[in-house]
């Protein structure tokens, strides 16, 4: 009987363990879930809060977290570039692997952004192209250099407040697929729409990148 209890206790411990050992310099992740209303994230502030909430659950809520999202100029408000929101780096994933040294490195061919390195706040990999379902489309609203994307028909889903009409720029975290820039992690193609159904229909799920905004 003691052996049975010991086995059950060991199984319970194993199922409670995270997917990988979390690094103390953890400062980058892909959201494990979106708010659930497509690209309606509650604006930039709502997206930042979502990053903060997910990080808090991992014990890193005291860090300032920012969503890697750009927003277009509208209603008297100036444009916002994703690259200007995320601090100066460097950034590391859940396992402690460096993603990029700084914003210039992040937006270069040197960036360590692959299917294996882009982990959630739980240290888990996300489905990419070839998996079922494919969830590799990541919301960014950005150009290749991290500035706001203003292509025809794209309104960054009313600056992240629309879960229906509109469109936004998405990237491929696994660096493969279709679109104008299929290997781009932040600017592969436009979304079909802004609803959860539209995002899922073209290979996404409303996920976005979160960075610890460490300043110099």
Image (cartoon, helix red, strand yellow):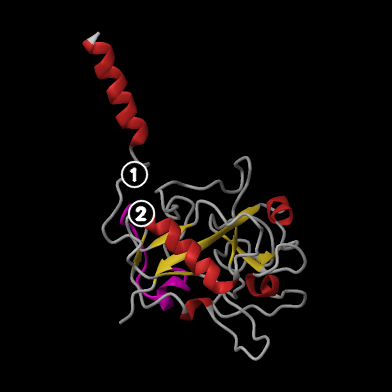
Q: Position of residue 101 (x, y in %)?
A: 34, 71
> Would you identify the image quadrant in which residue 54 lies?
bottom left
Closer to the chain start, of discs 1 and 2, is 1
Position of 187 with respect to 5 (left or right) is right
Position of 143 with respect to 8 (left or right) is right
- Please say if the residues under marks 1 and 2 sit with CB atoms less than 8 Å apart: yes
Picture quarter with the C terminus: bottom left
Position of 121 with respect to 46 (left or right) is left
**Residue at x-position 69% and y-position 56%:** 199
**Residue at x-position 69% and y-position 63%:** 179
**Residue at x-position 36% and y-position 63%:** 27
- Label 2: how many residues lie within 10 Å, few (<14), some (14-19) or many (20+)? many
Give the residue number, with chain letter if any, for mark 2: 94
Per the rendered image, the range of residues in magenta is 94-110
Residue 109 drawn in magenta:
yes
**Residue at x-position 51% and y-position 48%:** 126
Name above or below for residue 76 compared with residue 72.
Answer: below
Q: Position of residue 191 (x, y in %)?
A: 71, 63
- Label 1: how many residues lie within 10 Å, few (<14), some (14-19) or many (20+)? few
Name above or below for residue 1 compared with residue 47.
Answer: above
Task: Report, in whole angstroms, how far the alpha carbon at label 1 lies from the one at label 2.
Answer: 8 Å
Give the residue number, with chain letter if any, for mark 1: 20
Q: Position of residue 46 (x, y in %)?
A: 54, 68
Q: Nearer the viewer, residue 213 or 96?
A: 213
Q: Position of residue 82 (x, y in %)?
A: 52, 76
Helix, strand or loop status at disc 1:
loop
């Amino acid at each position: 009987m003691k052996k049975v209890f010991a086995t059950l206790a060991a199984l319970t411990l194993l199922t409670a363990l995270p997917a990988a050992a979390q690094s103390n310099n953890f400062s980058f992740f892909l959201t494990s879930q979106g708010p659930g209303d497509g690209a309606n994230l509650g604006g930039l502030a709502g997206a930042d809060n979502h990053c903060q909430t997910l990080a808090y659950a991992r014990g890193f809520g005291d860090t300032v977290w920012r969503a890697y999202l750009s927003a277009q100029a509208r209603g008297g408000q100036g444009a916002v570039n994703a690259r200007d929101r995320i601090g100066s780096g460097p950034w590391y994933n859940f396992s402690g692997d460096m993603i990029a040294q700084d914003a210039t490195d992040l937006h270069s061919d040197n960036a360590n952004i692959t299917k294996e390195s882009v982990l959630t706040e739980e240290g888990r990999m996300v489905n990419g192209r070839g998996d079922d379902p494919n969830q590799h489309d990541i919301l960014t609203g950005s150009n290749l250099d991290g500035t706001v994307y203003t292509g025809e028909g794209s309104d960054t889903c009313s600056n992240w407040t629309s879960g229906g009409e509109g469109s936004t720029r998405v990237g491929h975290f696994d660096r493969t697929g279709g679109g104008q820039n299929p290997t781009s992690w932040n600017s592969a193609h436009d979304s079909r729409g802004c609803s959860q159904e539209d995002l899922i229909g073209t290979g996404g799920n409303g996920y976005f990148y979160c960075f610890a905004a460490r300043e110099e």
